[in-house]
Amino acid sequence: MPNYNLCNLVLQKETIGFHDRTGGNMSQTIRSVKQALDAMFSFSRQTPELSISQIYEDVGLHESSVHRLLATLEGKQFVERYTLIGVYRLGINMLHLAISPWNLTICASIQIATYTECVNNIVKLSTSPSLTIPQ
């Protein structure tokens, strides 16, 4: 059963490749987006906090390029900087993307369908009225 999440969709696009309308190589704008995504994919469950040097070693960009990318991502709250210990981690807007109502509904539907098959019974999902999902 496919896993419908933002990361898989981005990785599928990465496998296909990006081309501009003229059939040439990636434009500078698309290259910047790819580099920002590469930097964000450096973070994982095993490495939730990374220094600039760890990121630029992972993505193969110059330190100043990574610094500019992270500053832009920090401004949009896709990463957070912890200046006291000199590391970055994914920010609140990554969470907003990950738990958008569409993504949450798709993921819940897939899990409910799978569980329904396993137990051969009806499965219902309910939430607390106080639960709010960032939009």
Image (tube, rainbow, N blue to C red):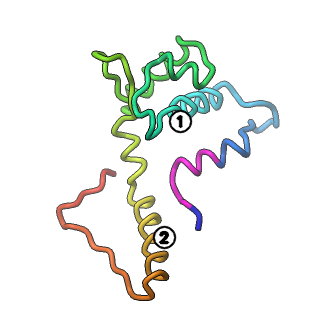
Which quadrant of the structure image shows residue 103? bottom left
The overriding secondary structure of the stretch rendered in magenta is helix
In this rendering, the answer to whether 100 lies above or below 36 is below
Residue under the image location 73 percent in, 46 percent down: 16
Q: Is residue 9 magenta?
A: yes
Along the line of sight, the residue nearer the viewer: 20 or 109:
109
What is the residue that sits farthest to the left in this orientation?
Answer: 130
Asked whether, in this view, residue 63 is left or right of residue 105, the answer is right
Residue 52's x, y, as percent? 47, 18
Q: Is residue 79 magenta?
A: no
Residue type at tag 2: Ile
On the image, numbered disc 2 is attached to which residue?
A: 110
Dot placed on the residue nearer the N-terminal end, 1 or 2 = 1
Residue under the image location 59 percent in, 63 percent down: 2
Q: Which segment did they paint magenta?
A: 3-11
Mark 1 surroundings within 10 Å by alpha-carbon count, few (fewer than 14), some (14 through 19), many (20 or more): some
On the image, numbered disc 1 is attached to which residue?
A: 41
Residue under the image location 38 percent in, 59 percent down: 101
Q: Which mark is residue 52?
A: none
Residue 109's x, y, as percent? 45, 71
Asked whether, in this view, residue 66 is left or right of residue 74, the answer is right
Distance Cα–Cα, label 1 vs label 2: 25 Å
